[in-house]
Amino acid sequence: MRKNFNYVFSSEINVPLRIRLVSLSGYLTSHGDMQRYATPSGCMFVRLTIYCNGRIIGRSVQSSFRQYLPSGTSSIRDIQKFDEWINLPVNYSDLNRDALLHVTLWDVGTTVEPVLIAQCAKKLFSKHSIFRSGILDLKLEQVIGKSDKTKLINENSNLDLMNIPTPAKQAESSEDARDSTPLLKNNDENLNRQLKCGIPLNDLLKKEKLYNQKFIDRVDWLDKITFAKLEEIKQEAKSDDRSLFLTIEFPIVQDSDDLTIYSIIYFAGEAPSSTDHHHHSQQFENDLDVDPLLPKPRNERQTDPELDMENLSEIKHHMMTRNARAMDIDRRLQPNPTIRDTLEAIIKSASCQAMLMEERDLIWKFRFWLKSNPKALTKFIRSVNWQEKLEVRQAIQVILEWEPIDACDALELLSPNFSHPFVRRYAVSRLQSTTNANILLFLPQLVQALRYEPSQQDLLASVEEDLLVVTQNENASGTSTIVATSSNSVHPRMASSRQSTNSDIPLDYFEGHESMDLATFLIKIACQNSPIAIFLYWYLKVEVEANFGNKQISEFYSSVILKLQQALSSGNSACKQTLATISSQKKFVDTLVDIAKSVADSSGSRSKKLELLKKKLIENNDLIDLKGMSLPLDPSVHVKSVQPESTTLFSSNLMPMRLTFSTVRGNITPYECAEAYTTIFKRGDDLRQDQLVLQND
């Protein structure tokens, strides 16, 4: 079954349009001047014409002469069989969105000159700009009138001057709001009438189209019955209508390798360049054969030369609204009730919702009034253009004066939408004020945010230019004076910060918290808390293996693991004990992985695999005596050994194991056995999404 909508642009298909004439069936009019043509002569032909913008494109093409004698075995009278592919002198790429096919039926059986019998028109593109494909049944409108009007169709290309219905008007009247097989398009009553089965005919035709486009599965035995019945319904509908129907077929675009069906979507080609347009216009003006009274060529597309350029008005407006000279004025601004409600709505909007330019300008304008609201800080940071140096310097000074935000709100500033080093370090400084329990809760997201940290080169550049927002002028006494480059006013913490000889940021820059990157913060707090260190190691380990295909990300997380191990090895005795625990856990997990792999690869039934698993658990001495090791899943639980007799295997492809451990009270030998602890060990599955579900609970 086809699941994807595959398409090609019409501008890319430079091949002639082909249409297959299948057959003509139905009933001819038997009254008026056309009564002598009521009996089919078997000497009819069809003429096809393409119209774009109401005018003929190319020349008309007609079918070959072929006399036909109807058999009369069908439920609806067969008038003529064509079974002929016709190539029209128009490429798919030349078609307009309003292109239509005009079909005329002619009879040469009783007269020397061909006589127009019927006509119809059909738009080539549906309302969704999809080119029609497959078999279509066109209802022909029979011409009732004098035969001398038929000569006019060969002499005049503008059908608006004719008395007979124009193709454009007829196509509009026959174009319904649906993109289905256009059977009986001019007869809505028959199209939408209820069948004996209680289903409208149009719904069946829609299903047939979806089946032909491979959106419905094939069931061979059922398809034969269904389509035989559907053909009977269509023949009955044609017979009841007692009109003329011309069956045509449009080609289906398929891939030559895998036979994938593609739809043709209308798409205009690229507009000619301004140079080509000027050359064409100049050539038109210099052409001596062109009548100067004639209008110049129409429908020429011209490109705007300033389309990809920056808007000078917007740039000027941005510079005026973000000018540092307006800081003193902006400090005194107070919003009126209407603006206050607008600001409140912006602040309460979701963080995933994009901010409009007007909203960003409004937040910036009243930034000093909003700085007492911690919830508004993230919106203010999003309103700053962090590529403009002068604007960044103003923003940093305002952020330092802002009411500190909560740690949970600071997580948003560590997302990939905020790449400036100052913003990310500010978020880390807010994490320093929260508890270890919250850090443990946020740890999966913090590990994910590590990949969005700026490079060391960007970090050093930020320290020198953006983060300090100052230039240092040495005076005669040898002290450092910090001066803001964009304003005469200096923030107190800026003035009191010491000159740094390396890339470190002053320790008192963020309300007494150290300025550090996220990785340094996580490693530092891991050295102070053993559960955080254990969870941090395994979260990093998972990211290394999950990003194995991305070498850069995998190596980055590996480097963080190495820094964590180095920090623990150079720390106090508690840090070294934590590192030893992590090493034991790694060996324990590797052993279980090897056992699970050997059990899954072994042949035999589930019971035999379970016996093999219990045997391997008993033979492994490391699993029998775990020496009070803390589990990676829950470092607060210390286990003594695995209970092989309680182990089971789940009936799944990956064969998950249910392991039961004997726990201990305390961490001092000899261990005292406590209650059993049961876990599930599953190899080869990414459980991070499951972890997020548990985290939300």
Image (cartoon, grey):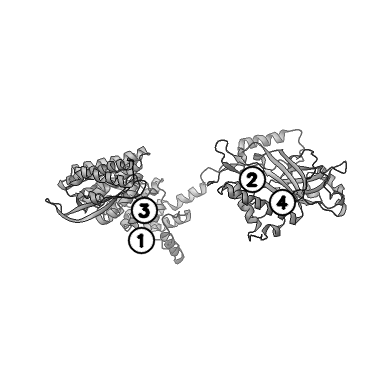
Disc 4: which residue: 171
Disc 3: which residue: 412
Q: Is residue 258 above or below residue 335?
A: above
Crowd tier of the residue under label 3, counting other residues whose Cα lies within 10 Å: few below 14, some 14–19, many 20 or above: some
Q: Could you say whether the residue bearing mark 3 is in a helix, strand or loop?
A: helix
The earlier-in-sequence mark between 1 and 3 is 1
The earlier-in-sequence mark between 3 and 4 is 4
Q: Is residue 215 above or below residue 255?
A: below
Tell me the kind of residue under disc 1. Answer: Asn
Tell me the kind of residue under disc 2. Answer: Phe
Front residue of 124/356: it is: 124
Tell me the kind of residue under disc 4. Answer: Ala
Q: Could you say whether the residue bearing mark 2 is in a helix, strand or loop?
A: loop
The answer to the question of whether label 1 and label 3 lie on touching residues, with beta carbons closer than 8 A, is no
The structure residue drawn at horizontal position 71% and vertical position 36%, both measured from the top left corner, is 285
Crowd tier of the residue under label 1, counting other residues whose Cα lies within 10 Å: few below 14, some 14–19, many 20 or above: some
Tell me the kind of residue under disc 3. Answer: Glu
Disc 1: which residue: 373
The residues tagged by marks 3 and 2 sit, at their Cα atoms, a distance apart of 46 Å
Q: Indicate which disc residue 131 carries.
A: 2
Q: Could you say whether the residue bearing mark 1 is in a helix, strand or loop?
A: loop
The earlier-in-sequence mark between 3 and 2 is 2
Where's residue 403, x and y in %?
32, 58
563 lies left or right of 231: left
The earlier-in-sequence mark between 4 and 2 is 2
Of tags 1 and 2, which is closer to the observer? 2
Q: Quadrant of residue 42?
A: top right
The residues tagged by marks 4 and 1 sit, at their Cα atoms, a distance apart of 62 Å
Where's residue 376, x and y in %?
38, 58
5 lies left or right of 364: right
The residues tagged by marks 1 and 2 sit, at their Cα atoms, a distance apart of 56 Å
